[in-house]
Image (tube, rainbow, N blue to C red):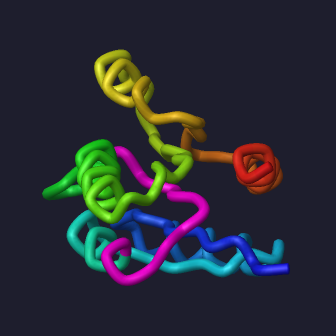
């Protein structure tokens, strides 16, 4: 059976390294992008089963990044990829913006690693 591929998009080095180790330990293949532009390049070259994106990043934020990824996928006739957004801030405006992403989940920083793994398993079911 093919390992599920996850793209983690976060500008914090410690976060992406920790998530990478955790997800790989749980049997996933993990790709890392430190910003939205890097993520767009990766999506042009690879297909993913799940996106995990930090909402607040300098330059292109996580929501803008996922919107752009969805445009790329649409042009390639590939269905949208499920998204888990990671954020340290509850923001009603951003929550409204991401309602169009399905399935979508939120994980609030700081998060429990078992909660994240369970959410990944749930979304990829």
Residue 60 locus on image (x, y percent): 18, 55
Residue 33 place in picture, x, y as percent = 38, 74
Q: Is residue 100 left or right of residue 83?
A: left
Residue visible at 49% across and 67% down? 8
Residue 99, image x, y percentages: 43, 24
32 is higher (above) or lower (below) than 51: below
Q: Quadrant of residue 17?
A: bottom right
Q: Determine whether, in the image, residue 8 is placed left or right of residue 73.
A: right
In this rendering, is residue 59 above or below 22?
A: above
Residue 89 occupies quadrant: top left
Residue 105 in the image: x percent, y percent? 59, 36
Q: Residue at x 77, y 56 (%)?
A: 117
Q: Quadrant of the N terminus?
A: bottom right
Magenta stretch holds residue 44 = yes
Task: Please give the range of residues in magenta.
Answer: 43-55
Q: Along the line of sight, which residue is nearer the eye, 42 or 87?
A: 42
For image coordinates 50% across by 69% down, the residue present is 7
Q: Is residue 8 above or below residue 119?
A: below
Residue occupying image coordinates x 31% and y 43% = 63
């Amino acid at each position: 059976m093919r390992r599920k591929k996850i793209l983690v998009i976060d500008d914090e080095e410690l976060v992406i390294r920790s998530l990478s180790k955790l997800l790989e330990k749980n049997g996933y293949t993990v790709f890392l992008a430190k910003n939205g532009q890097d993520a767009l390049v990766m999506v042009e070259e690879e297909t993913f089963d799940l996106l995990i994106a930090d909402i607040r990043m300098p330059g292109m934020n996580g929501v803008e990044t996922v919107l752009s990824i969805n445009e790329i996928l649409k042009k390639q006739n590939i269905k949208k990829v499920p998204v888990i957004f990671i954020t340290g801030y509850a923001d009603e405006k951003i929550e409204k913006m991401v309602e169009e992403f399905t399935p979508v989940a939120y994980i609030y920083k700081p998060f429990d690693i078992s909660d994240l793994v369970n959410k990944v398993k749930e979304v990829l079911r």
